[in-house]
Image (cartoon, rainbow, N blue to C red):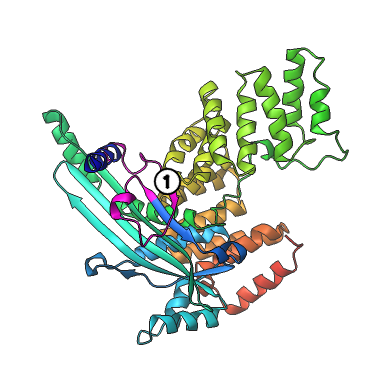
Amino acid sequence: MRSFYLALTLIVCAAAGLSGCATRYVQGNPSTVKSDDMMGDVVISEAAAEYESSPPACLGLMPFTVSKPSFAPVEDVRKAFHAHLAPTGIRLISLQKIDALIDPKAAADRNLQKIAEATQCDTLITGEVTDRKTRFWGIYSEVRTGARLKIVRVSTGKVIWDGHHTAVMRDGGVPLNPVSLVGGAVSAGVNLRDEQIKRTVHDLARRLVHAIPQLKYVDDMPVIADAKGMPPSESKPESVQGFLTSLEARTDEDKKNSLVAALESNLWRTPKDRLAIAEYLMRIDQSNPRGYVEASVAKLSLSEPTEALELAKKAVTIDAANPDHQFQLGRTYLHLNQADQALRPFLNAVSVPNPKSLHFNALGLAYNQTGRHSMAAAAFTKSLELDKDNPFSLLQLGLAHVGMGDEVEAAKIVRKSMIISIAANDAASARRSLNLFKAMNLNTRISEEELKAIEERIDKLAPV
């Protein structure tokens, strides 16, 4: 009976493709989990008790090993993990610096100690590729990449986090007629293209990075309610509860107009206040998408992405033509680590006559997270046509070029992002660009004197 259900799961996932089965994050010891229990896109991870009390302040990826010689080479897997760790904002030791410090003749523990001392980073990641196969049966294909990661606190030798996942992309199926036989064979063959293999590697990296506690992919995109960066109100408003109470004696139409005006104003800016206003609007007018999309934005800010997704879906159901609604739906998918699902609503958002730069940025983020860096570069380039010299767009464009292997162009773009941020006295953007510039080892593309000058100018900016 158990084998029947496993086979059924395989069939369902095969029909749905890589993104068809939702990821389940399970707390458990990766060493004791059976391979059969890994079905259904399950990520198994376990954090030691000290992780919460003393989380990593920095991370460095050691060279990956393989459980079987046939899985080598695996440097592309290591680079994918590095690319997905960089946008989380944690201090990341460049791969080149780690590789330069490694002594091939020394024991693994000794190399860990040497790198920790030289980089002043006490938490390093060791990785092993546990599965890597591409199989083709004429009408059915399968691409698999699996890895196990451990975060080691070098000073104590303890593993403070341990995670394992196998990403699988399947295509093709049982033919129902001669036409579907040909179609299935073509589909299965296409599935083995280099792009699909790369997508599987990045899916593996994205999911495992998502499982590491207290690390999040930072999108840094303004939300709909604050897209124009409204200044704080000069006058202190009444409490949101007082405002809502004052509406009770009014007509429903007057209430709706007042609630929408409140959401469009800058009087109540905290997520909880905006959520209270949006929920009131939803109660008296269930057909108004504004309440649902605003509630979804607030729920994301309150770290409740599952609830945010359902609200965004409702807004899109009511008014699918509104690009802001599609954008918010895509954002919720990104926050739920479902970048593939985010692509469709983002594409819908940019398909309108006058698309927003912000929406192209969102599309580029989704492409970067799924490893389609050339598509990401195209999206960010379009964003920059609409909003010239936007430091966020430039930074993300630089990351896309790193993913494509063009570090020379990436260094130029990220350097420009830093310079523009410095000129605008934007300390947060400048420091973010500088951190990623170093994390991706792009600092080797400029002179030490220029890097020092940039760092000094950033240090003189107003505090973040």
Which residue does the image show at 48% across and 54% down from the upper left? Answer: 211
Q: Is residue 371 visible to the viewer in this orientation of the structure? A: no
Q: Judge whether residue 332 is colored magenta.
A: no
Q: Is residue 169 left or right of residue 421?
A: left
Which residue does the image show at 45% across and 72% down from the upper left? Answer: 95
Question: Depth check: 32 or 418 in front?
Answer: 32
Direction left: furthest residue: 178
Which residue does the image show at 21% across and 46% down from the upper left? Answer: 141
Pointer 1 residue: 24
Location of residue 246 in the rendering, given as x and y in whole percent from the top left corner:
84, 22
**Which stretch appears magenta?**
14-42
Direction right: furthest residue: 235
Q: Judge whether residue 36 is colored magenta.
A: yes
The quarter of the rendered structure image containing the C terminus is: bottom right
Asked if 141 appears above or below 55 in the picture, the reply is above
Question: Depth check: 413 or 158 in front?
Answer: 158
